[in-house]
Amino acid sequence: MLRKSALALLVTLGWKVVAAQILEVDTVAGRYQGLPSALSSDVSIFRGIAFAAPPVGSLRWKPPEPPVVFSGSRLAERSGPACWQARNTDNSVYARGKLDRSEDCLTLNVFTAAADDNANQPVMVWFHGGSNTAGHGGAQIFDGSNLAARGAVVVTANYRLGPLGFLAHPALTAESENASSGNYGLLDQIAALRWVQENIEHFGGDAGRVTIFGQSAGGEDVCLLMASPLTSDLIHRVIGQSPSSGCVRLQRGLEGGADSAHARGIKFLESIGIMDSGAVALASMRELSPQKITAMTLSEGNPNGPIIDGWVLPEAPGNLFAWGEYNHLPVMAGALADEYFGLQEGAAEISEADLDSYITRTFGSIGLSLKSGYQVLIDQSPISAQKTIAGDNGFIRTVRDWAQLLSANNDAAYVYYFSRPAPVFRLYVPARPDLHGDGGARSLGAYHSGELAYVFDNLDVVGIGWEPQDYMLSEKIADYWFNFASSGNPNGPGLPNWPAYDSTSRMVQIFDAEVRSAIHPRSANMDRIDALVEP
């Protein structure tokens, strides 16, 4: 029921309230007032809700604390700033423009079409991609209105990035009551999930049906959260979109030589001028400006992603999944046909000899046998062949391996392969979509992140050059995602049947102009890679 104060405020702001909505909510920290969505009239949006205390000063490089309690009521009309990150070029599909950045960034956004707090709708919590060094949950492409309109409560969250989110160091480990450091970004995500458990019913959500979904680094993160003992009872389904290889292949721990997390952290701080390892180091670290920390994140080998810390991740995730020591939940996961055509868009053409060098660096001299599976592409463009091999060995094979581990433990896994060439545009700068002045030509195939607008059913919100087939595909994909969040199974009326994955049939759902089930189109290439990398 609308509170009079909220309704009066909306009328003053010029909003026309056309449906019964939740527009004012009491959370554990205080009261927030939301606004109707501009995309769907029966959806309310609450932006910029703090789910943890600002991780600044003495709280920098520590697990997140509960949000600060406030009095009165706050208008939740604007997403919080992005967590600190380097700015990237505008000449990229991944351009993010001139983001507001702050260490006080642990906020989330809630999209709900529930009429009251008894709606018990499934909850979908989104963690963005960006190599765990960039991105934010408030991007327009992640507007959850059209998913929420299907009957879900959608949450999009920020988390600490780069060294501020993933720096491990002996001094930090020594002060930790868990003898751990490094996975602060994952801990932020877990804090967001705890906030969901404590508050989401007031937004009409069912705290017993929480789906975490994410893409790229976010896809890897949700995979790792599934493996973490800290998320027990916090999550109930998982969707991994193009998860990075750390999902099943992460090996870096706190100790273990020159490339260990501690060694990287020591080297990183020494490059800034901090040579100590005790309390003096801690004080110096927390006096650094975020600008100085972020300026150092561009060099290779800096702390920029999850590690095996003995607490958040007690063991290598591949081992945890193989041993059955993880949260046994249904999973939906997939990758795109041309992942690296976006990630390496500007790469110049190479010779076949250059391709041979890449293959032998990656797989050893015996790896040249892979070429037989890519010869047609090699003859056309060696750099295209290299990008395809990288995608098969990376995102596509990671999804397959994750699904096989789950299937071996009798957990349902639904695998997809997105092969629809998507329009090329600035994904996160909707005001300037036309990247190459070609109206969004599909020059990169089914490129990394090309599925995002389809998943959120936001083709009318971002992008350029959409066609009727894209709208039909987006409708189906968003329906699959909602169905899975609702029941743990993506299937539903009017949708092509999507079988669960098993290692024998290798059936996956093909997302293209036609949606259908088939043996994974890259199975033969993955088999060739398996023969090279497995003992």
Image (cartoon, rainbow, N blue to C red):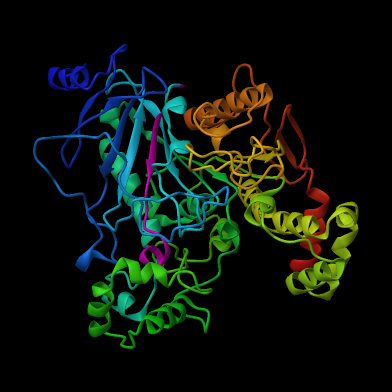
Q: Is residue 469 above or below residue 327?
A: above
Q: For the view shown, which residue lies furthest in the front direction?
A: 437
Residue 419: % across, % down:
72, 39
In which quadrant will I find the C terminus?
Answer: bottom right
Is 124 contained in the magenta span? no
Q: For the view shown, which residue lies furthest in the left direction?
A: 71
Residue 192 visible somewhere in the drawing: yes
**Residue at position x 32%, y 41% from top?**
79
Q: For the view shown, which residue lies furthest in the bottom direction?
A: 275
Pick the residue in front: 4 or 363.
4
Residue 428: % across, % down:
49, 43
Q: Is residue 5 above or below residue 396?
A: above
Residue 181 visible somewhere in the drawing: no
Does residue 275 appear to the left or right of 446 in the view shown?
A: left
Residue 25: % across, % down:
21, 29
Q: How many marks?
A: 0
Pick the residue in front: 419 or 172.
419
Residue 514: % across, % down:
74, 26
**Residue at position x 37%, y 17% from top?**
41
Pick the residue in front: 193 or 147.
147
**Residue at position x 33%, y 47% from top?**
192
Q: Quadrant of residue 368?
A: bottom right
In which quadrant will I find the N terminus?
Answer: top left
**Residue at position x 37%, y 49% from top?**
158
Q: Quadrant of residue 73?
A: top left
Q: Is residue 407 above or below residue 464?
A: below
Q: Quadrant of residue 134?
A: bottom left
Point out the stretch of residues depicted in magenta. 150-166
Does residue 80 appear to the left or right of 358 in the view shown?
A: left
Is 156 contained in the magenta span? yes
